[in-house]
Image (cartoon, helix red, strand yellow):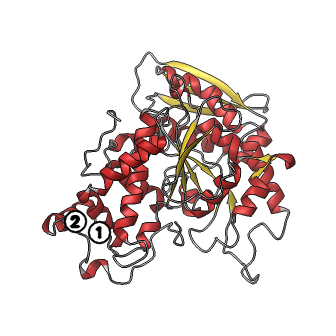
Amino acid sequence: MNSVVFALRRTLQAFPVAALMAAAAPASAAVVSYDLAPVSYIQQLYTMTTPASYASCKPSTTEATIACYLTESLKRDKIPFNSVNVVLNSAGSAYTVSIDSADPRAAQYQAAQTTFLDQNHAGQALNGVTACEADSSCWQVQPQDPKGCPGPWQFWLPLGLPMVSQKAVMMLHYPPYTSFQAYDYLNNATLNRWERLLTSVGVPADQVNLYEAIVDVMPIAAPGSGETACLTPAMSETYFGNASANRNYIAPMLTLLANPPVNAGKRGTAPVLVFGSEPRQVWASMNKLASFNVLDVGTVTLPGATKPTAYIGANHPIAAVYDTCTSTPNIVQMEIQDLTTACFAEAMSADPGADPIKVKNTCYALQSLNQPAICINAMMDMSKKPYWTWAQAKTWCDANNNNPCPPPPAATSAKAPKAASVQKKQ
């Protein structure tokens, strides 16, 4: 636990994700080249859409789409590079990837990316989506149906995230469609708030992306709310956790992402953080748990893994924005739980072999006393448009003994919907 930094960060700096602008790298960089094939298969994995005006990159070809996401991954892995180039080879049989970088971790991308995309990982998700699309009771059930859910839906893998240096794996429900339009998996209120929580417990702002490797139990981009009746845990298990039907995506992808090269010498894998009721239900079913609630922790050995994996049950990262001083749980309780989850992620990533129960208990005790972080996050989460900044919330908390309750009227008026938010989940 000595490696855990509990000092409160006061600002959250934006992490640069400009799509194809290379990070600074030494002039003597080496070029790592490898192929992604077959072409028709890769095209199905790199789904495209008309980019939104706020998109981090705006590709018009599969080659540019691969380069866009690969560039984001390298930056989020903190790997400096001169350039990323993706071309269709002369035979038209494969996409050739070239990464110009002197960082030895760049060479790890060949195994990391090709394994991520292979038939045993991404291919299993594709099989599940294909089966769901063929079933009218599964795919984007129309509004006139009693359980109708709004569209659009789109198959979308967790692309553009760290692949070789990640410190934790997030298990989430599904990605918001607005992020798909942005060509950026992290461009949404849910993950912005998670990053704020991480900095609140002392994770440096330029390291937060390393805690954002993601496995969705439903790899389908969909609107940020109104999908609960359709994107169910049962559907997830049928289409993305079904080994007998060759649709076994969730467990193998968790095993892969929890074991990055950076973790090779450690006693355990990167921790798995299970956010929200649907992922918690899927995790409980996977691991035969009688119950699995917020802040429940434990250790499992993931399928095919040789090291133990610590895990924690968590609130959905955006759920607290629906809480108040009088809700159940109330906003203070929610902030303590969420800060404990962030603390657990940092501590278990530093020492994956630690006892997760002791780590959780230590984190809970510390974060229960972290009054500045509790208050600032609570004020930001309760605020309405225009949403309070960290500086505004801190100023109010400093003047009110770090007590967010009762909040000023600006935090209690009816709120406009937050972008890419979700129905309240715990």
Left or right: 48 as drawn, with respect to 234: left
Residue 345 figure quarter: top left
Which residue sits at x=32%, y=62%? 377
**Res. 174 in view:** no
* Viewer-side residue, 122 vs 99: 122
Which residue lies most toward the left here?
399
Up-down relation of residue 414 to residue 96 (above or below): below
Q: Position of residue 325 (x, y in %)?
A: 33, 76
Look at the numbered discs 2 and 1 and tell me whether their residues touch, using CB distance below 8 Å.
Answer: yes
Up-down relation of residue 158 to residue 290 (above or below): above
Distance from disc 2 to disc 1, alpha carbons, whole Å, reads 9 Å
**Disc 2: CA contacts within 10 A as few (<14), some (14-19) or many (>=20):** few
Q: Which residue is disc 2 drawn over?
A: 392
Residue 321 figure quarter: bottom left
Q: Position of residue 259 (x, y in %)?
A: 58, 32
Left or right: 103 as drawn, with respect to 307: left
Q: Nearer the viewer, mark 2 or mark 1?
A: 1
Amino acid type at circle 1 is: Met
Residue 137 figure quarter: bottom right
Q: Which residue is disc 1 drawn over?
A: 379
Q: Quadrant of the N terminus?
A: top left
Secondary structure at badge 1 equals helix
**Disc 1: CA contacts within 10 A as few (<14), some (14-19) or many (>=20):** many
**Res. 24 in view:** yes
Up-down relation of residue 258 to residue 249 (above or below): above
Which residue sits at x=85%, y=65%? 135
Amino acid type at circle 2 is: Gln
* Viewer-side residue, 272 vs 318: 272
Which residue sits at x=78%, y=42%? 41
Which residue sits at x=32%, y=41%? 204
Secondary structure at badge 2 equals helix
